[in-house]
Amino acid sequence: MLNTLRDLPVFEPRDLIKSIMLATLEGICMGLPYGLFVQLVRELVNRQPNYTLIIAVSCAIALVMLIRVWVTRQNTMHTGTMTYKTCATLRERLAHHFFKVPLGFFERHNSGQLSQSMNKDVEFTETIFSHHFSQFIASVSLLLTVSGCLAIYDWRLALCLLSGLPIALTIQAVMKRKANQFSESFLQGVATTNNAIMDWILGIRAIKQSGQGNNLFPKLEQQIQHTQKASIRHEIAVGIVPMLFILFSEMGFLVLLLIGLQLYLTQQVELTVFIVFLITSVRLYRALAQIALTMAEARFMQQAAKRITTLLATPTMRTKEQNLPIQGHIAVNDVTFRYSPESPKVLDAISFTAVPGTLTALVGPSGSGKSTLLHLLARFWQVDDHKITFDGHSINAFSDASLYQQVALVSQDIHLIDDTILNNLKMVHQGLSEASIHNACQQAQCHDFIMQLPNGYDTLVGEAGDALSGGEKQRIALARALLSEAKIILLDEISAALDVRNEAALLTLLEQLKQSKTLISISHRESMVIHADNVVYLVNGLLKGTGHHEMLLQESKNYQDFWHHPDKSS
């Protein structure tokens, strides 16, 4: 447990040491009265009791108990304050770290998993540390104190009390690794089920509209039932470890009873001492049970801490944090990219340029690397310096604020905050006039449908914008990009949800926009690509051609097949 706490990068060693010292002192104060109790009983049953000693021992017991109350209060306050402060810091640390990781990180991690680490894992760590850690240290201290005190009166009986402990510790050590692996697998299954439930809730509108609810719900139900059965198996399999620890620990009581009787019958031990040992054993074994249960709970804390430290170890973006102006000159220089060192190349030696006043279309079959390339231009992932440049400056030279004020991405996966449409549009920057917002929405072809909503621009979009369709969210995102006054606009298949009339209006808008901006667009519609000034044709992550659409049709049979015979293109 201490190793787990040490691995979490937010616990102050000084606070941790103070908590351990207070818990240790609390355990000593709980154990000392039992040692003094032996002396008290011996004097009480003595034919000539020493009343002065009886009073002194009784006062000592009372004093120790009063000290224990004070120490327990101090320990509770310190540990609680430290834990809640530390866990708040841990959440802040995670949030700050998430702000610095590549944006593509959030495409690779389910929001349910991140939410679990930010909330459940931190909360579980908080619960274990605030409620169980001090009890564990105090129980160990109590065990050592009581054992030491009793050994003063009769070391043989003290050894009998603890005779089962070596076997219990051996079983704990042998079964610990297996139990940890089982717990890790179980918790991964729980996370998968939580993600499935979240996906179901977020997508329930689309599921109902598709008419597939009756077909899809049994899969979710099966997943939940599987997790329920796994929970029972996990409790049975993992719960046996503390049970065996307690069982073999308490076997020492049987040894104490047998050896103690023999010593008493042979007059090698006083009856009062033997009886006090029997009474004290109840408290000692309760402490051992507390230790066993805390070690079992710590297993879950280790898994939670492991997930937290793994997230905190995610590499962050290496940027120079410079505020540089962008005019719109883009250069992609021999870019090769893979998502991890072990994964295959997604892009291989891609090069092209784009200048202000032009529209560049990224085209190619599914899986060719178009979205990856667009996301690299939006700095979702890290590339080597000067592999992608804006106006001659490496994309890594810009601060986030500087870059995203001048580069706007309109993707298919649009996230809107749970607020009004107006406030989602005002996120771009403060001080936007109502006229400029309406004008941008008219250009993005979303003004009309907004005005048809019950509250117009004051309509709530719901969590993640679920009250709107995908096409509606994308057009709001386009309006947001127009309001940002970015010099570079990256468009991910924005014509997919448009009919012929709206597509024509979009083409007109793009022609207007490119007069003062650089546009990069992914498109699967030839009607959109025809109007591009330059086409970048990708196949399986390789650059197969660049140039105007008509030129590529004439020079590349593969490009012809892509548009007119998709089954033949490769």
Image (tube, helix red, strand yellow):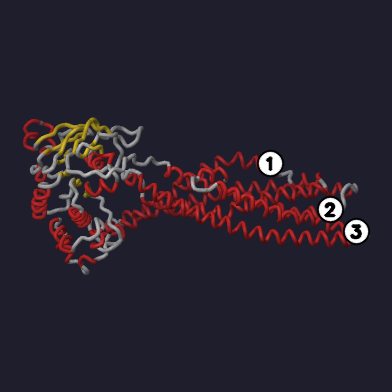
Which amino acid, mark 1? Ile
Query: Going from the N terminus, do you reach mark 3 or mark 1 first?
Result: 3
Separation of residues labelled 2 and 1 (CA atoms): 26 Å
Q: Which secondary structure, mark 3?
A: loop
- In the displayed structure, does residue 333 sit left or right of residue 56? left
Disc 1 target residue? 167
Q: Quadrant of the C terminus?
A: top left
Q: Position of residue 194 (x, y in %)?
A: 41, 53
Q: Quick one: 213 or 2, which is closer to the camera? A: 2
Q: Which mark is residue 273?
A: 2
Q: Earlier in the sequence, mark 2 or mark 3?
A: 3
- Residue depth check, mark 3 versus mark 1: number of the one nearer the observer: 3
Query: Quick check: can you spot residue 237?
Result: no
Q: Going by the image, does 374 lie left or right of 18?
A: left
Report the amino acid beneath label 2.
Val
Image point (21%, 49%), residue name:
410
- Toward the viewer: 228 or 262? 262
Could you say which quadrant of the image residue 471 lies in?
bottom left
Q: Mark 3 highlights which residue?
A: 46
**Distance CA(mark 2)–CA(mark 3):** 12 Å
Residue 492, labelled with which disc? Answer: none
